[in-house]
Image (spheres, rainbow, N blue to C red):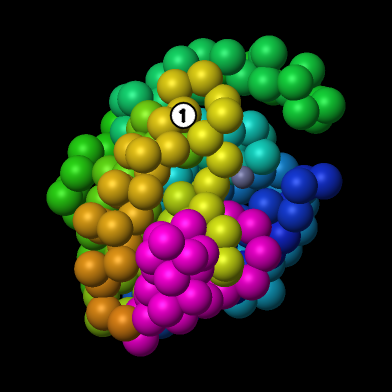
Amino acid sequence: MEIVVIPVTPFAQNCSLIWDTSTMKGAFVDPGGEIEKLIKAASDNQVNIEKIILTHGHLDHVGGTVALAAHYKVPIIGPHVGDKFWLDALGQQSQMFGFPPAAPFEPNQWLNHKDSIELGELTLDVLHCPGHTPGHVALVERSSNQVIVGDIIFSGSIGRTDFPQGNHQQLIDSIKENILTLPENMVIYPGHGPTTTVGHEKATNPYVSGQWG
Ligand SMILES: [Zn+2]
Ligand SMILES: [Zn+2]
Protein backbone atom coordinates (compact mmCIF):
# COMPACT_ATOMS: atom_id res chain seq x y z
CA MET A 1 0.00 0.00 0.00
CA GLU A 2 1.31 3.40 -0.98
CA ILE A 3 0.45 6.25 1.37
CA VAL A 4 0.79 10.03 1.15
CA VAL A 5 -0.04 12.06 4.24
CA ILE A 6 -1.68 15.42 3.61
CA PRO A 7 -2.15 17.66 6.67
CA VAL A 8 -5.47 19.53 6.51
CA THR A 9 -7.50 21.94 8.65
CA PRO A 10 -6.18 24.37 11.30
CA PHE A 11 -5.64 21.25 13.49
CA ALA A 12 -3.03 19.86 11.04
CA GLN A 13 -5.01 16.66 10.80
CA ASN A 14 -3.22 14.00 8.72
CA CYS A 15 -5.50 12.93 5.89
CA SER A 16 -4.06 9.81 4.23
CA LEU A 17 -4.28 9.19 0.52
CA ILE A 18 -3.77 5.42 0.20
CA TRP A 19 -3.66 3.20 -2.84
CA ASP A 20 -2.86 -0.18 -4.30
CA THR A 21 0.02 0.30 -6.75
CA SER A 22 -0.99 -2.67 -8.92
CA THR A 23 -4.51 -1.39 -9.72
CA MET A 24 -4.13 2.32 -8.74
CA LYS A 25 -7.38 1.98 -6.79
CA GLY A 26 -7.29 4.21 -3.74
CA ALA A 27 -9.10 5.91 -0.90
CA PHE A 28 -8.92 8.91 1.37
CA VAL A 29 -8.79 8.21 5.08
CA ASP A 30 -10.02 11.08 7.29
CA PRO A 31 -10.50 13.93 4.79
CA GLY A 32 -10.99 16.70 7.36
CA GLY A 33 -11.16 19.54 4.85
CA GLU A 34 -9.23 21.43 2.14
CA ILE A 35 -10.64 19.08 -0.44
CA GLU A 36 -9.11 20.93 -3.42
CA LYS A 37 -5.68 20.00 -2.02
CA LEU A 38 -6.81 16.37 -1.62
CA ILE A 39 -8.25 16.13 -5.14
CA LYS A 40 -4.98 17.51 -6.51
CA ALA A 41 -2.93 14.95 -4.55
CA ALA A 42 -5.03 12.11 -5.94
CA SER A 43 -4.70 13.34 -9.52
CA ASP A 44 -0.95 14.10 -9.14
CA ASN A 45 -0.46 10.48 -8.08
CA GLN A 46 -2.93 9.15 -10.70
CA VAL A 47 -4.99 7.41 -8.03
CA ASN A 48 -8.58 6.38 -8.79
CA ILE A 49 -10.52 7.15 -5.64
CA GLU A 50 -13.02 4.39 -4.81
CA LYS A 51 -13.82 4.99 -1.14
CA ILE A 52 -13.67 7.41 1.72
CA ILE A 53 -12.81 5.76 5.02
CA LEU A 54 -13.24 7.38 8.45
CA THR A 55 -11.43 6.44 11.68
CA HIS A 56 -13.80 8.42 13.93
CA GLY A 57 -16.42 11.13 13.91
CA HIS A 58 -14.46 14.23 14.91
CA LEU A 59 -14.88 17.18 12.57
CA ASP A 60 -11.16 17.68 11.86
CA HIS A 61 -11.18 14.11 10.47
CA VAL A 62 -14.50 14.13 8.58
CA GLY A 63 -15.19 17.76 7.54
CA GLY A 64 -14.45 17.21 3.82
CA THR A 65 -16.20 13.84 3.56
CA VAL A 66 -19.58 14.74 2.07
CA ALA A 67 -18.13 17.08 -0.58
CA LEU A 68 -15.43 14.58 -1.53
CA ALA A 69 -17.86 11.65 -1.69
CA ALA A 70 -20.07 13.72 -4.02
CA HIS A 71 -17.10 14.75 -6.16
CA TYR A 72 -15.93 11.17 -6.73
CA LYS A 73 -19.37 9.50 -6.36
CA VAL A 74 -17.92 6.99 -3.89
CA PRO A 75 -19.20 5.44 -0.65
CA ILE A 76 -18.28 6.55 2.86
CA ILE A 77 -17.03 3.64 4.98
CA GLY A 78 -16.82 3.84 8.78
CA PRO A 79 -16.33 4.63 11.54
CA HIS A 80 -17.98 2.20 14.01
CA VAL A 81 -21.61 3.07 14.83
CA GLY A 82 -20.49 4.13 18.34
CA ASP A 83 -19.53 7.46 16.75
CA LYS A 84 -22.97 8.11 15.25
CA PHE A 85 -23.63 10.75 17.92
CA TRP A 86 -20.50 12.66 16.82
CA LEU A 87 -21.60 12.65 13.17
CA ASP A 88 -25.14 13.66 14.21
CA ALA A 89 -23.58 16.59 16.13
CA LEU A 90 -21.42 17.96 13.31
CA GLY A 91 -23.28 21.28 13.51
CA GLN A 92 -22.30 21.70 17.17
CA GLN A 93 -18.80 20.38 16.47
CA SER A 94 -18.19 23.12 13.90
CA GLN A 95 -19.07 25.74 16.55
CA MET A 96 -17.02 23.95 19.21
CA PHE A 97 -13.90 23.76 16.99
CA GLY A 98 -14.41 27.12 15.24
CA PHE A 99 -14.71 25.43 11.84
CA PRO A 100 -17.00 26.39 8.91
CA PRO A 101 -20.55 25.00 9.34
CA ALA A 102 -20.80 21.24 8.73
CA ALA A 103 -23.97 19.18 8.24
CA PRO A 104 -24.62 15.77 9.82
CA PHE A 105 -24.31 12.71 7.57
CA GLU A 106 -24.43 8.93 7.80
CA PRO A 107 -21.81 6.71 6.19
CA ASN A 108 -22.87 4.08 3.65
CA GLN A 109 -21.36 1.43 5.91
CA TRP A 110 -20.52 1.28 9.62
CA LEU A 111 -17.47 -0.79 10.54
CA ASN A 112 -17.08 -3.53 13.14
CA HIS A 113 -14.06 -5.10 14.82
CA LYS A 114 -12.26 -7.51 12.44
CA ASP A 115 -14.13 -6.33 9.35
CA SER A 116 -11.99 -6.07 6.26
CA ILE A 117 -12.09 -3.40 3.56
CA GLU A 118 -10.99 -4.31 0.04
CA LEU A 119 -9.06 -1.74 -1.96
CA GLY A 120 -7.84 -3.09 -5.29
CA GLU A 121 -5.72 -6.06 -4.28
CA LEU A 122 -5.21 -4.73 -0.76
CA THR A 123 -7.09 -5.67 2.37
CA LEU A 124 -7.43 -3.29 5.30
CA ASP A 125 -8.17 -5.00 8.61
CA VAL A 126 -10.44 -3.04 10.94
CA LEU A 127 -9.67 -2.86 14.67
CA HIS A 128 -12.28 -1.27 16.93
CA CYS A 129 -10.34 0.84 19.46
CA PRO A 130 -12.74 2.82 21.68
CA GLY A 131 -11.53 5.36 24.25
CA HIS A 132 -10.84 8.63 22.41
CA THR A 133 -14.31 8.16 20.93
CA PRO A 134 -16.53 5.08 21.37
CA GLY A 135 -16.58 4.26 17.66
CA HIS A 136 -12.93 4.80 16.77
CA VAL A 137 -11.31 2.28 14.40
CA ALA A 138 -7.73 1.62 13.25
CA LEU A 139 -6.93 0.32 9.75
CA VAL A 140 -4.14 -2.25 9.34
CA GLU A 141 -2.57 -3.10 5.97
CA ARG A 142 -0.42 -6.13 6.68
CA SER A 143 1.37 -6.65 3.33
CA SER A 144 3.04 -3.22 3.59
CA ASN A 145 3.22 -3.33 7.41
CA GLN A 146 1.33 -0.07 8.01
CA VAL A 147 -1.46 0.98 10.36
CA ILE A 148 -3.56 4.17 10.30
CA VAL A 149 -4.64 5.01 13.84
CA GLY A 150 -6.38 8.40 13.81
CA ASP A 151 -6.37 9.81 17.35
CA ILE A 152 -5.82 6.52 19.22
CA ILE A 153 -2.06 6.93 19.67
CA PHE A 154 0.50 9.53 18.60
CA SER A 155 4.28 9.59 18.61
CA GLY A 156 4.93 9.89 22.36
CA SER A 157 1.31 10.54 23.30
CA ILE A 158 -2.27 9.22 23.15
CA GLY A 159 -5.66 10.64 22.22
CA ARG A 160 -7.64 12.97 24.49
CA THR A 161 -10.33 11.30 26.57
CA ASP A 162 -12.07 14.37 28.02
CA PHE A 163 -14.75 14.53 25.32
CA PRO A 164 -18.27 13.09 25.83
CA GLN A 165 -18.06 9.26 25.98
CA GLY A 166 -14.25 9.39 26.07
CA ASN A 167 -12.70 6.89 28.49
CA HIS A 168 -9.02 6.88 29.47
CA GLN A 169 -8.78 3.30 30.71
CA GLN A 170 -10.69 2.02 27.69
CA LEU A 171 -8.23 3.84 25.40
CA ILE A 172 -5.20 2.35 27.20
CA ASP A 173 -6.80 -1.12 26.93
CA SER A 174 -7.54 -0.58 23.20
CA ILE A 175 -3.93 0.43 22.54
CA LYS A 176 -2.45 -2.45 24.52
CA GLU A 177 -4.77 -5.09 23.05
CA ASN A 178 -4.95 -3.95 19.44
CA ILE A 179 -2.03 -1.68 18.54
CA LEU A 180 0.94 -2.78 20.65
CA THR A 181 0.29 -6.40 19.64
CA LEU A 182 1.00 -5.56 15.97
CA PRO A 183 4.51 -6.30 14.59
CA GLU A 184 7.15 -4.10 16.23
CA ASN A 185 8.42 -2.74 12.91
CA MET A 186 4.93 -1.81 11.67
CA VAL A 187 4.70 1.91 10.79
CA ILE A 188 2.01 3.87 12.62
CA TYR A 189 0.31 6.81 10.86
CA PRO A 190 -1.35 8.98 13.54
CA GLY A 191 -4.01 11.60 12.89
CA HIS A 192 -1.69 14.38 14.07
CA GLY A 193 2.10 14.72 14.14
CA PRO A 194 4.85 12.45 12.80
CA THR A 195 4.76 8.76 11.94
CA THR A 196 6.23 6.25 14.40
CA THR A 197 6.44 2.48 14.84
CA VAL A 198 4.78 -0.03 17.15
CA GLY A 199 8.16 -0.96 18.67
CA HIS A 200 9.12 2.67 19.31
CA GLU A 201 5.86 3.45 21.11
CA LYS A 202 6.02 0.22 23.08
CA ALA A 203 9.48 1.18 24.33
CA THR A 204 9.07 4.94 24.85
CA ASN A 205 5.44 6.11 24.94
CA PRO A 206 4.97 7.16 28.59
CA TYR A 207 1.21 6.45 28.52
CA VAL A 208 1.50 2.78 27.52
CA SER A 209 5.11 1.63 27.85
CA GLY A 210 4.88 1.33 31.62
CA GLN A 211 8.35 2.86 31.92
CA TRP A 212 6.98 5.70 34.04
CA GLY A 213 5.05 3.32 36.25
ZN1 LIG B 1 -10.36 13.01 17.44
ZN1 LIG C 1 -7.91 14.65 15.54
Quarter of the image with the C terminus in it: bottom left
Which residue is drawn at the image coordinates 48% and 65% (left, top)?
A: 212
What residue is pinned by disc 1? Answer: 166
Q: Is residue 202 magenta?
A: yes
**Residue lying furthest front in this view?**
213
Q: Is residue 156 left or right of residue 137?
A: right
Magenta stretch? 185-213
Whether residue 25 appears in this view of the structure is: no
Q: Amino acid at mark 1?
A: Gly
User: Residue 70, how many percent across, how many down?
Assistant: 57, 35
**Position of 191 relative to 189 (above/below):** above
User: Residue 118, how many percent across, how many down?
Assistant: 25, 59
User: Residue 80, how many percent across, how many down?
Assistant: 32, 33
Q: Is residue 160 left or right of residue 188?
A: right
Which residue is drawn at the image coordinates 32% and 25% (left, top)?
A: 81
**Residue lying furthest bottom in this view?**
185
Whether residue 205 appears in this view of the structure is: yes
Which residue is drawn at the image coordinates 32% and 82% (left, top)?
A: 184
